[in-house]
Every structure is written in C-alpha cells, then in structure tokens.
Amino acid sequence: MSSALPRPVARLIDAFARLPGIGPKTASRLAFHLLRMPDDHALQLSEALRALKESVVHCQRCYNIAETSPCEVCADPSRDSGTVCVVEEPLDVIALERTGEYKGLYHVLHGAISPVDGIGPTDLRIDELVRRMGVEPIREIILATNPSLEGDATAMFIERALRANGSEVRLTRLARGLPVGGDIEYADEVTLGRAMTGRSEVR
Amino acid sequence: MSSALPRPVARLIDAFARLPGIGPKTASRLAFHLLRMPDDHALQLSEALRALKESVVHCQRCYNIAETSPCEVCADPSRDSGTVCVVEEPLDVIALERTGEYKGLYHVLHGAISPVDGIGPTDLRIDELVRRMGVEPIREIILATNPSLEGDATAMFIERALRANGSEVRLTRLARGLPVGGDIEYADEVTLGRAMTGRSEVR
C-alpha cells in the first residue's frame, strides 16, 4: 500500500489478512474500525490473543484444549470413564457437549488422515488412544470422526490399530441418517441410502 | 458456549465477534485457526493491535492518521501547499495517493454530516479547516467527499462555512461521470445524467 498508510496500520492489516477467509479489503476495514473505536476494544483483542497461547494447554489424557490438565471433563468423577468418544477437533467436543446426551470421556485426534494434505496417522493422537486402552477401564470407543472420506478412513485406521493390538473393546460409530428437521425430498442419495439401511423398529 | 470451551478461547471468540462483519461462527473459526497455528501469528496480531493505539496519531495539520505529526505528506516540501483536498476518511487519502495524480495536501474530516447517525458538523474537522484557511496560503480547496447524500451535504456545509468567513478561495469538486471501463447500458440514470451535463470538448 501507499506510504500514506502508517506502518502500524499496515502491519495490522497484514496480520488480519493472513487469517483464513479475510482478504485485504476486509482486513483494512477491520483495522480502520479498530482505529475509530475506543482504545479498549483493540487492547482487549490484543490481550485475548496473547492469553490464547499462554493459558491454553492440551489435556494430557484426552488432548482436548483446556486451561488445566487434566481438563474439566477428564477430572469430573461423575463422567463415565468406561466410554471414550473419539473426535477430530475440539469444536466437535463442544458440539457433543451441547447435546447433553453424552456422559463419557473424549479423545481429540486434532485432525483426520488426509494424504492430500500430507496428514498421516502419526500426525494424529492415535498412538495416545492405543496407550489409553492399556491403562484405562474402557469398555466402548465411539468413533465420532466426521462423516467424510477422511473421517471414515481415520475411523477405519483406528479400528485396525485397536484390533491389531488384540483389543476386544466395543467399537461404535455415530448413526447416519436424515437430519432432524430435514426433508426427504432434498436429502442426497447417500444420506437417504444410509437412512434406509439403518432403519429402526417403530417402538 | 459450553464449559468445554476454555475461557481464554471464549474471550477471544467474543472479541472477534464484536468486529463488524464477523459473526460467532467466523469468530470461533478464527480462534481455532490461531490455536492450531505456530505461536508467532497470534502474537504478531496481538502486538500489531497494541501498537495501533500506541503509535498511530492524528497529524495536527491535516488530521490524517500518521506515525508523526506533521504527517509525511504535510512535511514533504515538494507537495503544493496551495491546494487542499478535503476527504471523509484516511482510506480516501490512500485511494487518491494511489492515483499519483495529486500533488497537494489533504484535510481529513473523519466522517460526513449524517443526522440519522447523529453526526453533525461539530463532530467533523470542519472548524480546523476554516482555521487552516486563515494561516495557510491556500488557493484551492477540492471538496472530495463521497458522491452520496451525506458527502454532498457535507461539501455544501463546508462551502457555506468558508464563504460566510469571507473566503474567496477556489472551491472545486471531483468530476462525476461514467467510471472508466464502465458500460453506458448499465450506468444508473443519475450517473449518466451527470456524465451528460459534465460532457467535455473532444480535443
């Protein structure tokens, strides 16, 4: 940009523009918005960013992001430590917690196997899951990876890794079917096919 | 959000979500992106935000944002100090500098008169412009406010304020007409009407 732009503003625009989904136009709009706002908004954002790396750790049991290790879920004695739900990302934990349907523990892989992006099994927390199997009283592992090619491949890899280790643990996957509130007419054929295969008795 | 979300992450999501055009979904995507990235990106952004308020000042001559007062443009002896271009925002200065067509000075109003938003003449740097007229050798003032209702009202207000002060300075506005690369067929009637009124001799 022109020399008419003070360097601190140019640096902030550059830093914003490196975020995903934020182009140079949006970045400069954000920077000028913060320039016009009272001081404390920019400083609050600055502080929040600094605190992010300083006070967020990975729980050394489930590898979810947390303020302490073990995290709140792992440290909660009322949770069922016999069930472990394996997810790709910390956001998946939040989504599952929001349902209120799950009372077990988690294991966060931090990604899915994706040869295209150069992500192999060793980049994920799969070895750590196998290790947990050996020391924790786990009865069931729910493979809650995404219903995508990468998620399915990751679930299959984990299944083989556990079985190769001689584990007899119960392995389950989340149900596939029609989304609640969805419309059969607009469902894609794969989802509809799965909904048909997985149909259940009317009770 | 759920208690599964560490507070520093929740705080960062809140701070991002207060920015214009960033909703809670985008805010959490940004926060999790920064969590995954190496430390230095979040820290660079944090530093850039802190520096924004610490090292950006308003030039006390033209009120553009700058690192020093007077700013680079005002301090440049090669610029024509007899011409002052009045704009609404610092971004307008950058746009005009980019054209390379303008060699005079600027005056940044920091907004336009807009009764709907509660912005009156006293909220803008209009008094400061009248004051500059008294002490600087200004021959021409270019009223380069936006071609909008608010911009036109602001330009008209400034014109009256200067004339009421007995000033005989030359007042001009930016040309209205067809944008370069535009299409007559798709031009709106106001723009096309202005282009017709302001037509010039073929030379």
Image (spheres, coloured by chain):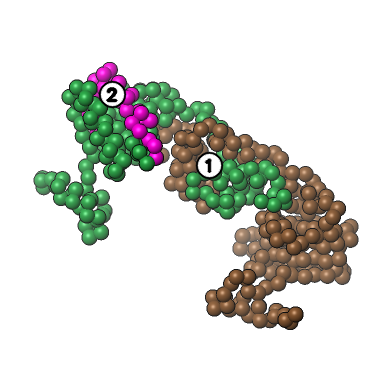
Chain colours: A brown, B green
* Residue A193 belongs to the span the image colors magenta: no
Residue placed furthest toward the top: B135
Question: Are marks 1 and 2 in one subunit?
Answer: no
* Residue at screen point 69% across, 49% down: B5
B56, above or below A153, in the image: above
Name above or below for residue A126 compared with residue B168: below
Q: Quadrant of residue A32?
A: top left
Q: Are marks 1 and 2 in contact (CB under 8 Å)?
A: no
- Name the spot of residue B84 as percent of width and height, x first: 27, 29
Q: x and y percent of residue B136 in the render?
A: 27, 20
Number of residues whose C-alpha sits closer than 10 Å to that of mark 1, classed few (under 14), some (14–19) or many (20 or more): many
Classify the position of the N terminus of chain A by image quarter. top left
> Can residue B40 be seen?
no
Q: Give percent across and percent down for residue B91.
A: 38, 38
Res B125 seen here? yes
Q: Between B101 and A71, which is closer to the camera in this rendering?
A: A71
How packed mark 2 is, by other alpha carbons closer than 10 Å (few <14, some 14-19, many 20 or more), is some
- Residue lying at 45% horizontally and 42% vertically, measured from the top left: A28
Q: Which residue is mark 1?
A: A15
Q: Is residue B136 magenta?
A: yes
Query: If the image is split into quadrants, where does the C terminus of chain A sit?
Result: bottom right
What's under tag 1, amino acid-wise? Answer: Ala
Secondary structure under badge 1? Answer: helix
Q: Tell me if residue B74 comes above or below residue B147 in the rendering.
A: above
Q: Which residues are magenta?
A: B117-143
In the drawing, what numbered circle is on residue B130? 2
Which chain's residue wears label 1? A
Q: Amino acid at mark 2?
A: Val
